[in-house]
Image: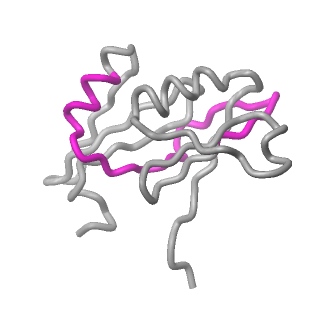
Amino acid sequence: MITLLDHIQFVMLPGQESEARAYYVGLLGMEEEPKPGDYASRGGCWFRAGAVSVHLGTDAGFVAQDKPHAAFCVSDLDALVAKLAAAGHEIEWEGIIPGRKRLYTHDPFGNRIELIQDGDGFSQR
């Protein structure tokens, strides 16, 4: 039986590691972690914030999809929205479920990300 989501993998085109760092470290506040062994030579980068781990791999044929996404709970959604908007990232507030403060945005590569105010997450209620 599943007990934990270990990590999520997103994709970007080769050579976009600096944009990944600017977004995942600079805006989302994650820390980059070294890729182990042979993974280090394959391009991409890995990030972590507490128990949340994001792996960005590279694929020369990558085309972003609109529907699949990861959902992250954040401690101060309003502050993060201000940072993302100031950096030019679109914000799409989601109001379908009353009482849950959440939105969709995209990383620089088109990967869809849901951000939820901590406490409003689906696994938290």
As for residue 52 lying within the magenta part, the answer is no
Q: Which residues are magenta?
A: 56-84
- Could you tell whether 124 is left or right of 114 in the image? left
Please state the horizontal and vertical placement of residue 98, each as a whole percent of the image: 15, 53
* Residue at figure coordinates x 29%, y 48% from the top left: 116
Q: How is the image coloured?
A: one colour
Camera-side residue of 113 and 7: 7
- Could you tell whether 44 is left or right of 116 in the image? right
- Could you tell whether 26 is left or right of 63 in the image? left
Which residue lies most toward the bottom here? 1
State which quadrant residue 44 falls in: top right
Please state the horizontal and vertical placement of residue 124, each as a whole percent of the image: 27, 67
Please state the horizontal and vertical placement of residue 42, each as a whole percent of the image: 83, 38
State which quadrant residue 21 falls in: top right
Camera-side residue of 39 and 99: 39
Residue 89 against residue 8 in the figure, above or below: above
Q: Total label count?
A: 0
